[in-house]
Image: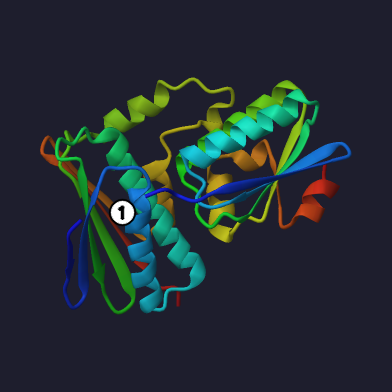
Amino acid sequence: MANKFDIQIRAEQGYAILETAGYLNDALGEQLSREAQKLIEKGYTQLVINLDKTALINSIGISILIEIIEALEERSGTLNFCGLSATQERTFRMMAIAKYAGIFPDEKAAIANF
Amino acid sequence: MENIVLKDQVCLTIPMDRDMELVAAKTGSVLAELNHFNEEQTEEIQLAIIETCINAFEHSQSEDRTVIIKYIVKADELECKITDHGVGFTPEDQHNSISKRQEIHSEMRKRGWGLEITKTLMDEFDIESSENGTTVSFIKRMAS
């Protein structure tokens, strides 16, 4: 059984948005990490990860998100999340992610708060 | 996979293979929805099942490579008992495993969250573990 997932990337002036769809486990997390790393290497240090189409996230997937936060910190960058469900936001706050990354309701707010 | 359906109890056996935790989570989701849990609580139940199953996949060292999930449905609550036949663990094992990890931000550690997340999201939580295996039990009560 293969978990279907997808990542849409939109690079804008000064920031980029990565929009995930599907179960955020190790496989999607690693793909997301590779895409984020490519953007960072191109000079994008302000990233938004939109999780609106990701209904389920496991702790392995979240651990990979932490690696993206750390990679951006090395470049003095910022990661903002949006589109989280209430349970996802609660889990992110429990894992202290909210201290090192922004959590916003939608892309507009995430972009406005870089 | 073997499914046993009783009046108020469903038992599911899953192999320890990629994404099989989703099968267990979706079953829990359907039972929660049938029993009128709200969307947020249903998601919490799914996440607790996913984390507990992944924990068994990664750490149990089970020879039979299966996890048994028993869902017990009551009027206002859903109980899950998730069992593996692995080597078991003690709370000290778990603490030591977490303490050994080196992180840039110690409070934002990457791994070792599974059972902590489950415990936080559920209303009751219990672990029974021995050298013959581990059963993690949790109960979610319906929001009033």
* B55 shown above or below B43: above
Chain of the residue under the numbered disc 1 shown in the image: B
Which residue extends farthest left? B132
What amino acid does circle 1 point to?
A: Phe
The residue sitting at 74% across, 27% down in the picture is A40
Residue that numbered label 1 is attached to:
B125
Residue B111: image x %, image y %? 45, 33
Helix, strand or loop for disc 1: strand
The residue sitting at 18% across, 36% down in the picture is B62
Residue A35: image x %, image y %? 65, 34
The answer to whether residue B119 of the structure is visible from this angle is no
Q: Which image quadrant for residue B129?
A: top left
Q: Which image quadrant for residue A70?
A: top right
Left or right: B58 with respect to A34? left
Task: Say how the picture is coloured.
Answer: rainbow
Residue A4: image x %, image y %? 49, 51
Left or right: A15 with respect to A59? right
* B100 shown above or below B128: above
Q: Quadrant where the C terminus of chain A lies?
A: top right
The residue sitting at 17% across, 59% down in the picture is B2
Circle 1 residues within 10 Å: few <14, some 14–19, many ≥20: some
The answer to whether residue B99 of the structure is visible from this angle is yes
Of B120 and A36, nearer the camera is A36
Residue A89: image x %, image y %? 59, 52
